[in-house]
Amino acid sequence: MKKERFESIDVEKLNIVDKDGTIKMTLFNQDHIPPAIMDGKDFLPGHRQNWPISGIMFYNGEGDECGGLIFGSEKKENGEYTSSASLTFDQYKQDEVITMTYDNENGVSTYGFQIKDRPKTPLPEQIKRLQEIRESDKDEAAKQQEIQALWEGSTQRAYMGKNKYGEIIVSLMDKKGKPRLRMLVDEQDNPRMEFLDGEGNVLYKLPPEL
């Protein structure tokens, strides 16, 4: 196979493909953001359009999106700005289960590492069912109940990072996404550990309150 060498290449979008043309990875700028592809279809038409991001999208052996690295920023005329970046890995036929994120809004930063649970139902099926519920003739309360049941199993299970208050946090959640163990060091470098019940009530705290 002939190899070619280039000292410099300028490109707005670059697809890395296998021998049969299946995309394995895409590098892109904000004018060429790839659609959300699964089973060969864009299951979220219009999603991500006009986002101020560039990055890399990953695809599995079937051509399904399975994660990515995205980053970008946006500055307004009044001087306010936002900046963000994330690295994600998706469950097979589902959404992200491992995420590293950074967000900054006008100098207030949050960043961390998250672990999530996802259901076995393929994400396109959930999206289709969500649209059917929204278009149904049921009352709003019934719709919300069905939507809540639809996303059951999509929960955050662990987080480690820094919040907007300057606290470094490690939080472990139960299957319902409720915090059950929380450790933190606050801005004054005071450490604390809390054990919680399923309703968010503190059962035990270290150091204990006197």
Image (spheres, rainbow, N blue to C red):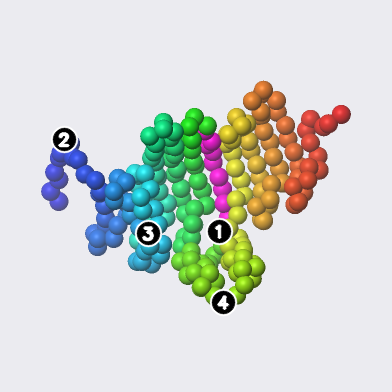
Amino acid carrying label 1: it is Arg
Amino acid carrying label 4: it is Asp
Residue highlighted by disc 2: 7
| Dominant secondary structure of the residues highlighted in magenta in the image | strand
- Category of crowding for the residue at label 3, using alpha-carbon neighbours closer than 10 angstroms: few (below 14), some (14–19), many (at least 20): few
**Magenta segment boundaries in residue numbering:** 109-117
Label 2: element kind:
loop
Mark 4 vs mark 3, foreground winner is 4
Residue highlighted by disc 3: 46
Relative side of 172 to 1, left or right: right
Q: Residue furthest right?
A: 210
In the image, which disc is placed on residue 137?
Answer: 4
In the image, which disc is placed on residue 118?
Answer: 1
Q: Position of residue 95 (x, y in %)?
A: 49, 57
Seen in the picture, residue 109 relative to 39 is either above or below; the reply is above
Image quadrant occupied by the C terminus: top right
Q: Position of residue 198 (x, y in %)?
A: 75, 52
- Category of crowding for the residue at label 1, using alpha-carbon neighbours closer than 10 angstroms: few (below 14), some (14–19), many (at least 20): many
CA gap, disc 2 to disc 4? 61 Å
Mark 2 vs mark 3, foreground winner is 3
Seen in the picture, residue 122 relative to 85 is either above or below; the reply is below
Q: Is residue 129 visible?
A: no
Q: Disc 2 or 4, which lies upstream in sequence?
A: 2
